[in-house]
Amino acid sequence: MVYSLEEVIETITAVGVETFDIRTITLGISLLSCADENVNACAQKIFEKVTTVGRNLVPTAKAIEKKYGIPIINKRISVTPIGQVGAACRGNTLVPLAKALDDAAELLGVDFVGGFSANLQKGFTRGDQLLVNSIPDALCTTKRVCSSVNLASSQAGINMDAVYRMAEIIKETSERTRDKDGLGCAKLVVFANMVEDNPFMAGAVHGAGEAEAILHVGVSGPGVVRAALMDSAPLSFGELSELIKKMAFKITRVGELVGREASRIMGIPFGVIDLSLAPTPAEGDSVADILEAMGLERTGCHGTTAALALLNDAVKKGGVMACSYAGGLSGAFIPVTEDASMCRAVREGALNIQKLEAMTCVCSVGLDMVAIPGDTSVDIIAGIIADEMAIGVINHKTTACRLIPVPGKKAGEEVDFGGLLGKGPIMEVTRQSPAVFVRRGGRIPPPIHSMKN
């Protein structure tokens, strides 16, 4: 793939004026060879493999930043789901494996490592059970480790036993990090239809179908798209879509350049570009700002879901033409605390959790970085998760929940998680209980249209 001087200059302009960056370069590493009956021996193998394979990740990213003048905000690692690797371990905890990952990430200078994960859509293996039970301890005793659990798929349906158990884990993790406003939950996400090549946290994982090691890139650039919309004349919907497609093409083109350059330097295969527009708490770097630039008075008003659907579709259409392989989640993220204008919409009463759930039908992920009152019950958390899983299962798309019950705080109060995790208002939840429904047990069957063979 050839890149012209004009393309590079245009990108550098975007970096300086329109808040453009590469959000992450993520190195996926298989840990299957690290399995061991002794959990401490397994932990040592994990540390050695991650530090060996990943030793050049951060220097490579910094060299590319210097060469092209393009910020690469996060350098991350994803690994084989630890529920699989730890299945061979004797004992009753996998926390030593989480600590090994954290120590490796610290040594390498990596921002986050994802993969303290399990797949529960049809049931629990012994390793998965160990993993789930270890999550609160793991997230409380590490700084960089992120956890993700798949609870549902379009082929398997929704494992409601796993949904309820993860609601309990979320609640426990929140209480265990009470002194930090439940921060542990910001590193924990539950999925329907979790993908194997996602470079974004907290859901990054190195899936079973991936190579021994591989590099994925997650692009960003909502500020670039917003600036283009603000500078344009009034557009029809077709013209609006075309403009977003063109900007997505340019953003993704640079991600492809970065990924292939990193692959060449490190001698590790290049995987996918995740086309997602990922906001930050910085003003002007907001997906909500794009929706409002389309003509909404405030994100959350009637018409928001349609606007987000247009944006998501245009980003995918433009981005997929600019890269060899698109993957991951690819679309527009709508995390609440990580997007300053989303927070403003919540504060002003334009956006509530019900409208946010409707928006997740057409966006990349789901209820992301949503702070809820600390006294929200396990039953209600399970109900929120079940609703989001149903959207993913029925629509054959990835959906997720990253819910943060904030201990001791109520709806309307503010919480500050710091850095890219942002700050914002705590959202109210419906208080009527779904307890009888969510405690029935078993699996909600998959939809009839899942039978495609």
Image: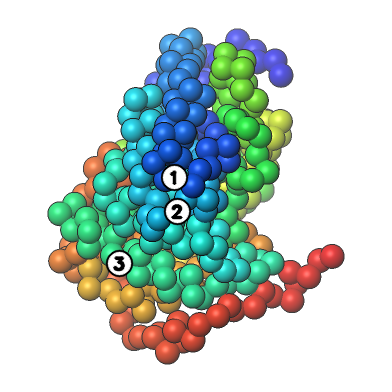
Q: Which residue position holds label 1?
A: 38
Q: CA distance from mark 1 to mark 2?
A: 6 Å
Q: Are marks 1 and 2 in contact (CB under 8 Å)?
A: yes
Write the residue at 64% across / 27% down. 270
x and y percentages locating residue 276 in the rendered image = 54, 42
* Picture layout, residue 219 above or below residue 309: above
Q: CA distance from mark 2 to mark 3?
A: 27 Å
Q: Nearer the viewer, mark 2 or mark 3?
A: 2
Write the residue at 33% across / 75% down. 378
Dot 2 lies on which element?
loop
Q: Which residue position holds label 3?
A: 171
Q: Nearer the viewer, mark 3 or mark 1?
A: 1
Write the residue at 62% across / 72% down. 157
Write the residue at 65% across / 25% down. 269
Given the image, on which type of amino acid does mark 2 rest?
A: Arg
Q: CA distance from mark 3 to mark 1?
A: 30 Å
Q: Which residue position holds label 2?
A: 90
**Quadrant position of the C terminus in the picture:** bottom right
* Picture layout, residue 140 above or below residue 425: above
x and y percentages locating residue 396 in the rendered image = 66, 63
